[in-house]
Image: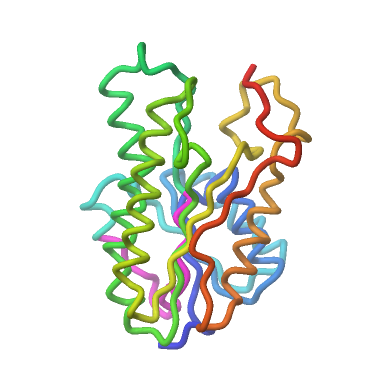
Amino acid sequence: MNYNNSSVLITGASQGIGRSIAITFAAKTLRPLLLLARNKNNLQETKELCEKAGAQHVEIVTCDAVSEEETESIIIPEGFPQPGLIINNAGSYLYKPLAITTNSEFRNQIDVNLFTAVNIVKRFLPDLLKMNRALIVTICSVGSLRGLGDSGAYSAAKHALLGYTRSLREELKNTNVAVSAINLGQTHSTSWDESDMSPERLINPTDVATLIVSLSELSERSVVEEIIMQPQHGRVPAM
């Protein structure tokens, strides 16, 4: 299977950063898009926005990627190209000190921020290995690199996600599957809907999407293993 003719699978595509990634791929490339999330109505909205942006072939898959069983049962629509580019974007941000974070909340952060990526990769890796070139891009966090005093469970889960992504890169070095991690700082998304932060102080999600498009267009001789992306003026205090 040829990477250039493959589709792009985007998790968490129903809103926020995932939606921005989908729309940007629709506007800047001719790749078919496979959009995955739990909310069917929001996915349909993203699909329509992608088609408006220029996408010729968009399919949606309603799935809770936290569930290994649901993820293993994903069926690619008949006639739709296999994904050659996987964008692990699904995640959840918990703004809460560790001292009052319940075990249930902690497990949920690990499930949503780590196991969505683990399950998606397990489902699609056998097909990626059959391609002449493939790419897995995982949205991690600056919280993957250092502790966060106001969101420790989130940071711990993102540390695990980055460790997983780094290990996956090492495991696949001798194959045609490239692996990239993007450690994002504060990016304008639905996570900040209840905050008084100005979107102008945060990373523009379209910039994140444009970066991923660029990563997807590198030759098979190169891979960006890891990158940090921050707001220009640094971390914005949560309000």
Q: Residue furthest right?
A: 200
Q: Which picture quadrant has residue 16?
A: top right
Residue 1 locus on image (x, y percent): 40, 88
Does residue 26 appear to the left or right of 42 in the view shown? right
Percent from the top left, x then y, of residue 220? 51, 83
Q: Residue at x 25, y 60 (%)?
A: 73
Magenta span has 47? Answer: no
Q: Residue at x 33, y 79 (%)?
A: 174
Q: Which residues are magenta?
A: 73-89
Query: Which residue, as the protein is rendered here, is positioned at the far left?
Result: 69
Q: Quadrant of residue 192?
A: top right
Q: Number of labelled discs?
A: 0
Q: Is residue 25 left or right of residue 200?
A: left
Residue 127 occupies which quadrant of the picture? bottom left
Q: Position of residue 132 (x, y in %)?
A: 42, 87
Q: Main secondary structure of the magenta part?
A: loop
Q: Quadrant of the C terminus?
A: top right
x 65%, y 43%: residue: 230
Which sits in the foreground, 140 or 58?
A: 140
Q: Residue furthest front?
A: 146
Residue at 26% of width from left, 47% of height from top? 67
- Rendering colour mode: rainbow
Q: Residue furthest top?
A: 100
Horizontal side of residue 161 vs 69, given as left or right:
right
Identify which residue, 125 or 69, lies in the foreground. Answer: 125
Front one among 161 and 34: 161
* Residue 93 x, y percent position in the rendering: 47, 32
